[in-house]
Image (cartoon, helix red, strand yellow):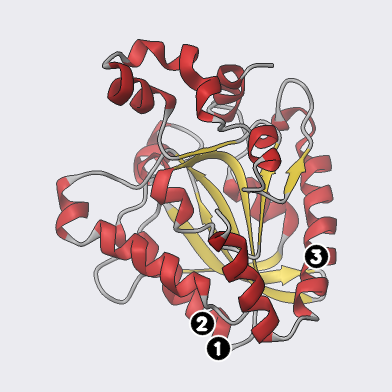
Amino acid sequence: MNAWERVQKARRMDRPTSIDYINNIFEEFIELHGDRLYEDDSAIIGGIGRLGELNVTIIAQEKGKNTKDKLKRNFAMPNPEGYRKSLRLMKQAEKFNRPVICLVDTPGAYPGIGAEERGQGEAIAKNLLEMSKLKVPIISIIIGEGGSGGALALAVADEVWMLENAIYSILSPEGYASILYKDSSRAAEIADEMKLTASDLLQLNVIDKIINEPLDGAHESFEEIAGNIKKELIAQLKKLKEKEISELLESRYERFRKF
């Protein structure tokens, strides 16, 4: 399967979204709202829940299920307040010593005028800085599209996992083709050049684990995939929680420094 076919699978309308994973992996989930500065951003769902015996904070980008829901969620393109809400919940997790689980699925941060006026770039940069030194374990899972800084703002983690048909890149193939070749129609042709698939990124040591999917995609056996993710999250978080905070932060720093 080539890279463009992976892109198409990552964008499928029937691909499970973050809310499906939240409902199938975590128990007693309570959603929390607002950034305490401007408003609540529905493109990002955040809250607390249980993962086995662990209390965790969950932060997820949500694309929506139908046209009305997608408009409400802004097609998973967060505004600055979404990232500020995320950071508020991360700092709360640090205060109460809860691990953070991030589910990444966005074509990118919202590029609208209002978002820029309210400090989109600063909000993303602040997340990168604060996540790098957050004193609790962080695991980020790319479940669909991982686009640009909009994805990275939830992916400065101790471990980054990807579903087999997810993608993770500096921008979309269409944007890449438009900038380099002045022709967005060449997106399918140049997708392989971008090294945006899970197998490419594992080979480059950008991610740590690939979560297998059926040939047609995650929707084919979603409950099994969610169950596997749950088991692996519990096991890995127990290992990360055994580390001293100084060791955890040093490992996280080295992970990104080597890029």
Question: Which sits in the foreground, 142 or 222?
Answer: 142
Question: What type is the residue that disc 2 sits on?
Answer: Gln
> Which residue is the site of mark 3?
236
Q: Is residue 228 above or below residue 245?
A: above
> Which residue is the site of mark 2?
92
Image location of residue 158, percent across then percent down:
65, 65
Q: Secondary structure at mark 1?
A: helix
Q: Are marks 2 and 1 in contact (CB under 8 Å)?
A: yes
Question: Which sits in the foreground, 157 or 221?
Answer: 157
| Residue drawn 36% across the image and 20% down it | 177
Quarter in which the N terminus is drawn: top right
Residue 106 placement, left or right of 29: left
Q: Bin the neighbour count of mark 3 within 10 Å (Cα to Cα): few under 14, some 14-19, many 20 and up.
A: some
Q: Nearer the viewer, mark 3 or mark 2?
A: 3
Q: Is residue 215 above or below residue 240?
A: above
Image location of residue 232, percent across then percent down:
82, 57
Instruction: Give the Cα separation between the discs numbered 3 and 2.
Output: 21 Å
Question: What type is the residue that disc 3 sits on?
Answer: Gln
> Which residue is the site of mark 1?
95
Q: Is residue 215 visible?
A: yes
| Count of numbered labels shown in the rendering | 3
Which quadrant of the figure has residue 163?
Answer: top right
* First along the sequence among labels 3 and 2: 2
Image location of residue 199, percent across then percent down:
70, 34
Q: Bin the neighbour count of mark 2 within 10 Å (Cα to Cα): few under 14, some 14-19, many 20 and up.
A: few
Q: Is residue 128 above or below residue 203?
A: below
Instruction: Give the Cα separation between the discs numbered 3 and 1.
Output: 21 Å
